[in-house]
Amino acid sequence: MEYLQFLIIIIFSPLVQGIIKKLKANCQGRVGASILQPYYDLIRLFKKEMVFSRVTSWIFRVTPFIVFISTIVAAMMIPVITTKSSFSLMGDVIALIYILALGRFFLALAALDAGTSFGGEGSSREMIVSILVEPMLMLCIFTVAITAGSTNIAMIAEPQSFVLSPSHVLALLAFLIAIIADTGRVPVDNPDTHLELTMIHEGMILEYSGRYLALIEWSHYIKQMILFTLFVDMFVPLGIAHDTEMTGLIMSSGVYLLKMLFLAGFMAIVESTRAKVRVFQIPSIVGGSFVLAVLALLTLIMVGK
Amino acid sequence: MISFFYLGIILFLAGAIASLIFNQRANGFAYILTSTGAVCFAIFGVLLLSSPPVSILSISTTPILEFVFRGDTISGFFILVISVVTFSVSIYSIGYTKGMANKGILGFLLSIFIISMYAVVLSGNIITFLISWETMSIVSYFLVVFDTQEKSAKAGFIYGLMTHVGVVFIIVLFLILYKYTGHMDFAGIKAAAGNLPDAVKTIIFIFAIIGFGTKAGIVPLHTWLPEAHPAAPSNISSLMSGVMIKVGIYGILRIVVDILGVGPEWWGTAIIIIGAVTSVLGIMYATVERDIKRLLAYCSVENIGIILLGIGTSMVLASNGLYKLSAIAMTAGLYHTLNHAVYKGLLFLSAGSLVHSTHTKNLEEMGGLIKLMPYTAFFFLIGSVSICALPFFNGFVSEWLTYQSLLSNFQAMSATAKVAAPLGGAALAFSGALAVACFVKAFGIPFLGLPRSHHATGAKESSLPMLVGMAILALLCLVLGIFPGHTIKLFSPAVSSLAGIEYVFPSGKGVIHLSKTAADLSPLAILVAMIAIFMAAVVLIRIIGGKSKTSYRDSWDCGISSLTPRMQYTATAHTNPFRRIFEKVYLPIRNVNSIYILKPLFLKSISYTNEIVPSFDKYLYNPITDFIYSISRKVKLLQSGSIHLYLGYILITLLLLLLFWF
């Protein structure tokens, strides 16, 4: 049973995306598409014909698979409803970040493959966001890992108290901003636009179509849910089961669902109330949260918790 | 065991002589000799790793001039590192030097260069070490200036200067050691080093960092790397960057960790800080570089920083008495040393193929080469993935270990060490992310998209020996990444002797398990999972989507007639956000020159230049060189060229001597 918990992330990640979109539409006074819309989109894309640019090479063709596979491997490494995860021997939270980076590396390469300026633009901007976010992500992880005495995610998700220590509060805030930046959401990137001047993630995948686009989009949803799950494992693990007993698992699933809904709501509110900033203002947003992450660590050292 | 040493030396010397004799003909034979020699030395290195220290050779001529060669596990590890890269470079050189002028001399120098590096790591006393070290420096100087068509004279000058500034510190450090211990022999020095006063130890530590750090390329002593590596022929750059700078690391390990032993905690913290600064600044300059070989050279600076993070952490933990954790950190440092040698060797070799085939080092003139040079592109990609520390290649394992040891540093006592370690981790994360950006550019711009100039359209795939040389290193990148347990087991005796405890690394069945932090890593499991998921994904796609339909069209061009190569993102454009965001670090010089027909509305032309002069050159080295030049100019006044004046000097000197002597 615990072997299959990663399937929850894979199967329900489009649903989370659908819920965010629905909530966002409601925030903006629209009815919005059904929460199942991402599933319909994926199935439609899987059935469509693929159009390749003549300029592209094999890098363009292997990238969707590498992105998809690496994201799923990352999903396997993370406890969803129970911390008793046998896949944890594959790697810890640091390895997870690097596995996600593998997908990002190939996506940024594939963006350059078609020889268009949109691709280059997306690739260049994605890199700048990632170098700003990744050190911050690591600092948050360090703060939590030092407290837990381990980088093993199952052990990080062990404590059952609801009270957060001061360092955790700071790291939590920084991590939330990291999630927003890393999943390509407003104010860093706008997931709903194809306007040349503003797009980051969409710019990179502009040349993709059909089933390859579906793979990349799906991976993007999965990655979003991985980051959400990592967030709840790191900061609010309360309610997660520690064994594979059935009632515990059902309880834990319910709690997990609530947490996901809460995060989805948070994302919808942030996206509806903020405007997208210029690319060169991203450093000031992310820089602020980097300071938060450093403070979290210093608090941990000075206060000891 | 020692017979492998003699056999190796004989083969290298034979290779040196053969390449002089055959010169323009049949130079492949000489390189086959050197590659066989490298195999002998690799076996010798492995045997050294699993044996107690052995005395190899000692020739005494006069009491002072005594050559002693001795091998232990630490030398064994470095011999292995040198041999691995040498083997591939030798095979690569068979193809690379074809059609090159003076290739006989190149082959000769290459063999001597490698022998001198082996001699450094096997030296058993001060004199042997210094002579081998100088031979290595001078021969590598000749190799830097070998290519007379390049602007290599300046590069050679900078390299020669820096390396000799470094050696001054090394000589003084050895003189101090000799004065206080009374021994020339390393074994004797090590035995007596415990009684050294603390102040002397500190001076030796600082001198070792400066002296050997110059060779290793720590910031701010790194300035020779981006000059010398691009100037040298690519097989030489591969050896210099992959191996020679590691000899600098060997020097630091031998003097600071092995001979001085466990020092105060701030030594380790200082090395962590140096490592963090070196890695961040190295990769920042690499990212904005357009010359592919300079880019790789700056990247070597970064990796030396990462190696030092591991070594520094190990020293901090040892000072706190946490020997087991210290051994893990040392494992991280040594593993990264080995890994960097392998993938940087590979990257320089494949960059060499690129330059060889396109006749340019400028990334902006390449493009679309993945179609013309598919194998080289593949090998360069493997090198890039490895250097970016992405799973499941070799860089990943050693960087992961470095992260783990930096985290375990939190168990150190002092607050400085506690703060330094996680910030070192953040520096590592930052440089890791920058490395990804850097190599997306370094691979994407030359290999993907459309050819940007005639250099790129006329490129041809490299010859077979070159490809074989690269393939060996590429395979090693994968093997060292998937089987970390076996690799660590191989060099763990070196870790044991550096960490001062008998240490067995906890790993089995392809899993690294660190009991202290309950952290596991298994690249093999990740690989297996990836393959399984790939198969599942293919089946799933087939079920949902049915049979695939594909068609080929032009890239999306917004409806204009067609895309031209000039519309692609360039290397400069790709990194422009970095230049703007980190303006305070790069201090870029931008010049926009507008020529008007009628001001201010009718423009005739705009020219734009953008240049980055590294701050170290501008604010540190240029003032120093200006100062030296101005003094030399004043001294020059003495040398007017007039014989009468010189006779006058002699007269005055004579008079002064007579006056003061009697």
Image (spheres, coloured by chain):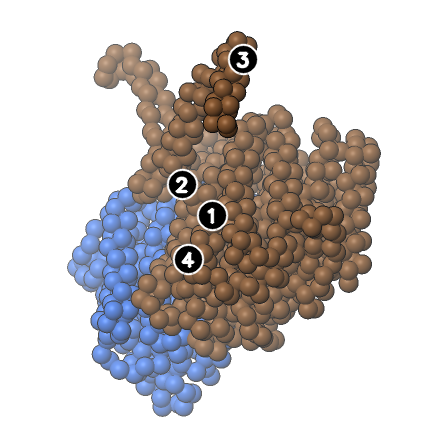
Chain colours: A blue, B brown
Q: Is residue B597 left or right of residue B556?
A: left
Looking at the rendered image, the quarter that the N terminus of chain B falls into is bottom right
> Is residue A259 shown above or below A139?
below
Q: Nearer the viewer, mark 1 or mark 4?
A: 4
Chain of the residue under label 3: B
User: Mark 2 — residue?
Assistant: B575
Mark 4 and mark 3: Cα distance apart in space: 48 Å
Q: Check disc 4 and report the residue beneath it.
A: B199
Secondary structure found at label 3: helix
Label 2, label 3: how many angstroms apart (C-alpha)? Answer: 62 Å
Secondary structure beneath dot 1 equals helix
- Chain that bears disc 2: B
Residues packed near mark 4 inside 10 Å, few (<14), some (14 to 19) or many (20 plus): few
Q: Earlier in the sequence, mark 2 or mark 1?
A: 1
Q: Residues within 10 Å of mark 1 (few under 14, many from 20)?
A: many
Mark found first going from the N terminus, 2 or 4: 4
Image x and y of residue B131, in percent: 64, 45
Kindly identify the residue that appears in the image at 68 percent across and 47 percent down: B65
Residue bearing the label numbered 3: B647
Q: Chain of mark 4?
A: B
Q: Tell me the distance, in whole angstroms, between the alpha carbons under discs 3 and 1.
A: 43 Å
Question: Disc 4, disc 3: CB below 8 Å?
Answer: no
Q: Amino acid at mark 4?
A: Ala
Residue type at mark 1: give it: Ile
**Secondary structure beneath label 4:** helix
Front position among marks 3 and 1: 3
For marks 1 and 4 on the same chain, the one whose residue lies earlier in the sequence: 4
Q: Which image quarter: residue B157? A: top right
Mark positioned earlier in the residue sequence (2 or 3): 2
**Position of residue B135 in the picture relative to residue A28 (left or right):** right
Location of mark 1 (residue): B210
